[in-house]
Image: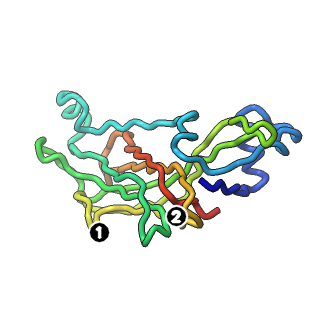
Amino acid sequence: MQTRMIALAGIACLVFLASIGNANAQEEENITLRYASMSEGEIARDSHDNASFASLPEVLQQSLLSCSYETKGDYPHTSNSDTEASAHGWWTVDDDYPSDCPQRADVEVELQAKVCAYDRRTGELKGCFWDTLDRKEKRIRPGGGAGKRTIARHDCIDSDLTYYRSIVDVDLVDTWDLPFKVTNAADLECLPRP
């Protein structure tokens, strides 16, 4: 796999180095930041709750909400003839439980790629973080499909293998809801445009 170096702003580099405890000028000069594949990114793995409302005990469901719904999202994938990475998010109403759901919800989708920092001299991995490439929010009806999903996208500049994830958050309109988020991740042959 051909490796492409990415250039990030000096301030972003300083913030990242401070977060891993190496924010001195000499260390900064010896750090290389680049997008990582899944195998590289597994070393510094992040996670979100992939739980759904439907996975809660029935008694808790009934006591918490009057709307029984589920947050849904697909895996990041390439689209438009492999020239961009994209991910979709939507919500569905659980028909097995009587509920009083709103007509619409605000569905936010974040598309992120893993970036890792390496020591230029030794090649040692110093740490990784998620770079948010696109964040979209749309007020939609439940169900998914055309017109009923939010889409986050980002252009590719090359076909280098890169580890992506999507994070989907559903906020019911004028109704209390739980803070569950759905996260899906995949390697794509899509090096993000800086």
At label 1, the amino acid type is Gly
Q: In which quadrant of the rendered view does residue 89 lie?
A: bottom left
| SS assignment at label 2 | strand
Q: Nearer the viewer, mark 2 or mark 1?
A: 2
Q: How is the image coloured?
A: rainbow
Q: Position of residue 148 (x, y in %)?
A: 28, 64
Front-most of 69 and 12?
Answer: 12
Q: Where's the C terminus, which quadrant?
A: bottom right
Q: Quick check: 161 left or right of 50? A: right
Front-most of 67 and 158?
Answer: 158
Instruction: Find the distance from the CA under tag 2 to the CA under tag 1.
Output: 20 Å
Q: Position of residue 33 (x, y in %)?
A: 70, 48
Question: Residue sitting at 26 percent across and 46 percent down?
Answer: 70
Seen in the picture, residue 169 relative to 45 is either above or below; the reply is below
| Residue, disc 1 | 147
Q: In which quadrant of the rendered view does residue 142 lie?
A: bottom left
Question: Residue sitting at 43 percent across and 71 percent down?
Answer: 81
| Residue, disc 2 | 154
Q: Position of residue 114 (x, y in %)?
A: 57, 47
User: Counting residues from the N terminus, which is met first, the one under dot 2 or under dot 1?
Assistant: 1
Q: Residues within 10 Å of mark 2 (few under 14, many from 20)?
A: many
Q: Position of residue 64 (x, y in %)?
A: 26, 34
Q: Residues within 10 Å of mark 1 (few under 14, many from 20)?
A: few
What is the residue that sits farthest to the right in this orientation? 26
Seen in the picture, residue 122 relative to 35 is either above or below; the reply is above
Whether the residues at callouts 2 and 1 have beta carbons within 8 Å, the answer is: no
